[in-house]
Amino acid sequence: MVNKVGLSGGLFVLAIGLVFFGYSLQYPYESELGPGSGMMPLWLSGILIVLALAYIASVFKGKDSSEKWPERKSQLEMLFILGSMSLFVLLLPVIGFNLSCIVFLFVFLRRNYSWYKSLAISAGASVFLFLLFTEGFATPLPVNMFGF
Amino acid sequence: MENLMLLLHGFDLALTANNLLFCLIGVTVGQFVGVLPGLGPVAGTAMLIPLTYALSPTTAVIMLAGIFYGAMYGGTITSVLINVPGEGASVITCMDGYQMAKQGRGGNALGVAAIGSFIGGVIAVVFLTFLGPALAKYALKFGPPEFFSLMLFGLLLLVGLIGKSVIKGLISAIIGMLLALVGQDPATGVDRFLFGQIELLEGIDFVILAIGLFGLSEILSNTEEDMNLKKPEKIAGLIPPRSEWKSCIGAILRGTGIGGVLGLIPGTSASIASLMSYSLEKKLSDDPSRFGKGAIEGVAGPETANNSYAGAALIPLFTLGIPTSPTIAVLLGAFIMHGLTPGPLLYAKNPDFVWAVIASMFIGNALLLIMNLPMAKWWAKIALVPYNLLFPLILLVCMVGVYSVNRSLWDVGMTVAFGAIGYLMKKWQLPTAALILSFVLGKNIEFTLVQTLSLSDNGLWMLFERPISGTLLTLCGAILIFGLYTTIKNKRGALAADESA
């Protein structure tokens, strides 16, 4: 039985190797100074392809040590985390930093805390971070039409 | 004598109110990172880098170095009181530390760990004070071939020692180097691997990669763990009884030596130092059966070794610009972002910076001793802050930190993507440590190779014609053969299983 996790890893590495190898061919191998901008990436991606094939071969021989995929509960939790982060990225330019932060924290905290506790912590943390970055580190953060 | 005068000048700079404040913040955050399970020193240091942009390079590195060695202290507390290591280097401390706590000797364990950590940390910084300038002076004789071979040697040592397979180590290292080549080639001006994205013209920002691969991926991995901790054991009497002093002092001195030597070798880690110290103490003991049942040397030795390692690991960074471990690679990234080039010229070009950071480490270790001896009880309570409250806040700090670097949402999106890739790499057992190290060194490796080939009349042979470079490359070959042999024969052992700190 082939370890599917290991196989996916091998194919992922192979794909990276092939993409970089293909792009490397577009850059000059030599230049007036000697080596060109394509030399190093061409060799590196070439070696990567060979290593990826060795990795895939070890999977088929049953010698790969990749771990198992997580259980469904963990998978959903991870999707929730990545989804919430993506939502934050999408909301930030639209509703500003403070409201995006409050939404982001609230969806996480509400699962374990009462709505008023979740809201209070979310709002407090958002305002603290906003002031820390804008006032403390002089880094402007995106704001909405109301200025926050 | 000259070094001593420079160190005194360093104290003068480190003791300014601003530097002192950020040293305190650094060691406190480090202690916090060490105490919290699921957040290692690599992730902690990487996440805090964006917050240092507004600071001067000296203040920034004082703070970031504080996080690194502070984490070594903090990891002990939860190991001893809850049997949960806060970071990788404290795993072995659980063996005897927790047993001591159950026997009502938790205070003794924490006391000897704090004292040992302080002694180990301070002696390592003394080494840095006196050995560093001498090594830097010697390294000034190095040319591009020597630096190329040295960087390759450091990278291959890491790849050779980390993980279950040297093939996977090499894969990670090569991916890291390829990612480092994204953006404009500084030598020829050619744009490489932009994939149609103008945002990649400047290359992939180090912060994005480090926070994604270490910070976010660690949080994703934690979804598979039970992060609820039990109540800590009670603490009483921090100073060990007089009868145990002799064995403690021996273990502390040996731990200092082990950590100090391993810190100089690329590819090792604080975890390896503590593991080796534990094995040595067990071997030297009159009654090895005491180990695992509350032997105080089993806490004193490893805890000293990991702190001694943390100080000594800065020597190759300061003098040669070579990071020996992932956390040091993150520090190297911070150096570069603040316009500093670690290496032999650092002592000559930025003496104020070097000596202020070294002096701050003496101060930081003293602060940590105070924090750990009378305040250990309170730190243990911090570990009980619910994880479900903590991790959304950590995620938010990561995202805002990344955004603040270039004020770019593209960067935040890339961090999320690298977080997912970092998690998958853990599943595939591709060591992320090798990726980050080669990413940091990648551009310099290419640059020194191009310089060497440009200078050489007979191609790559120049690398073997020069004695230092030739020796290092021969060693590289030996490491590769050793790594491949142990991979094929499945003899990688316990040392290969580690990739932390």
Image (cartoon, grey):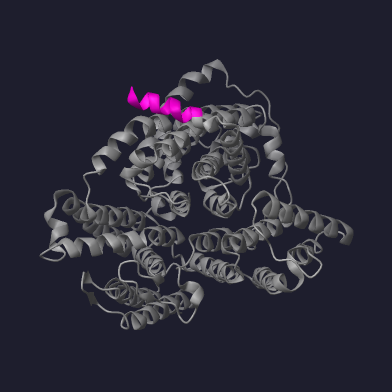
Asked whether the viewer can see residue B117, the reply is: no
Q: Position of residue B448 (x, y in %)?
A: 26, 59
Rendered position, B456 above or below A55: above
**Residue at 65 percent of width and 23 percent of height:** B237
Asked whether the viewer can see residue B383, the reply is: yes
Magenta highlight: main SS: helix
Rendered position, B319 above or below B106: below
* Front residue (pair B30, B440): B440
Please state the extent of the stretch shown in magenta in the rendering: B1-12
**Residue at 72 percent of width and 73 percent of height:** A91
The image quarter containing residue B215 is: bottom right
* Front residue (pair A29, B198): B198
Rendered position, B9 above or below A125: above
**Residue at the extreme right of the image, as rendered:** A116
* Front residue (pair B367, B75): B367
Q: Position of residue B45 (x, y in %)?
A: 54, 50
**Residue at 54 percent of width and 33 percent of height:** B364
Rendered position, B173 above or below B307: below
